[in-house]
Image (cartoon, rainbow, N blue to C red):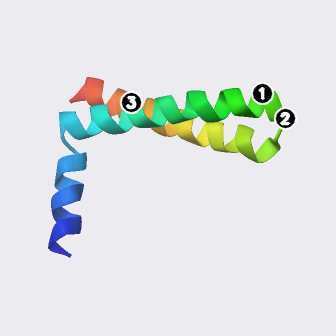
Amino acid sequence: MKAILKFDRWKNTKQGYAVFAIVELVLAYAVGSRALDTGSWWQYAFTILLLVGGLQNLVRLIRK
């Protein structure tokens, strides 16, 4: 429980937002390029979810 709270506090820092934004945007790019090759709908959906999450973290980073 203590580790989860410590991780949550770290995630809400500038460094945490930056790390999660970069990771989610890189994963969105990778899954998105794979989705274009395969035409899989679930990969398109997962790409959109990762893109939205990455952009949210980027906006939170800029606001902080």
Q: Earlier in the sequence, mark 3 or mark 2?
A: 3
Q: Position of residue 22 (x, y in %)?
A: 38, 30
Q: 23 or 14: nearer the eye? A: 23
Residue under pointer 1: 36
Which quadrant does the C terminus fall into? Answer: top left
Residue 48, by quadrant, is top right
- The reply to whether callout 2 and callout 1 are in contact (CB within 8 Å) is yes
Q: Which mark is residue 39?
A: 2
Q: Position of residue 6 (x, y in %)?
A: 15, 60
Categorize mark 1 by other alpha carbons within 10 Å: few (<14), some (14-19), many (20+). few
Q: Position of residue 27 (x, y in %)?
A: 52, 35
Which residue is rendered at x = 54% and y = 39% of the image?
A: 50
- The reply to whether callout 3 and callout 2 are in contact (CB within 8 Å) is no
Q: Earlier in the sequence, mark 1 or mark 3?
A: 3
**Distance of mark 3 from mark 2, alpha carbons?**
25 Å
Q: Which mark is residue 27?
A: none
Residue under pointer 3: 22
Q: Amino acid at mark 3?
A: Ile
Q: Amino acid at mark 2?
A: Gly
- The reply to whether callout 1 and callout 3 are in contact (CB within 8 Å) is no
Categorize mark 3 by other alpha carbons within 10 Å: few (<14), some (14-19), many (20+). some
Residue 38, by quadrant, is top right
Q: Give the left or right position of residue 32, taking residue 40 as reference.
A: left
Q: Position of residue 33 (x, y in %)?
A: 68, 26
Q: Amino acid at mark 1?
A: Leu
Which residue is rendered at x = 71% and y = 32% of the image?
A: 34
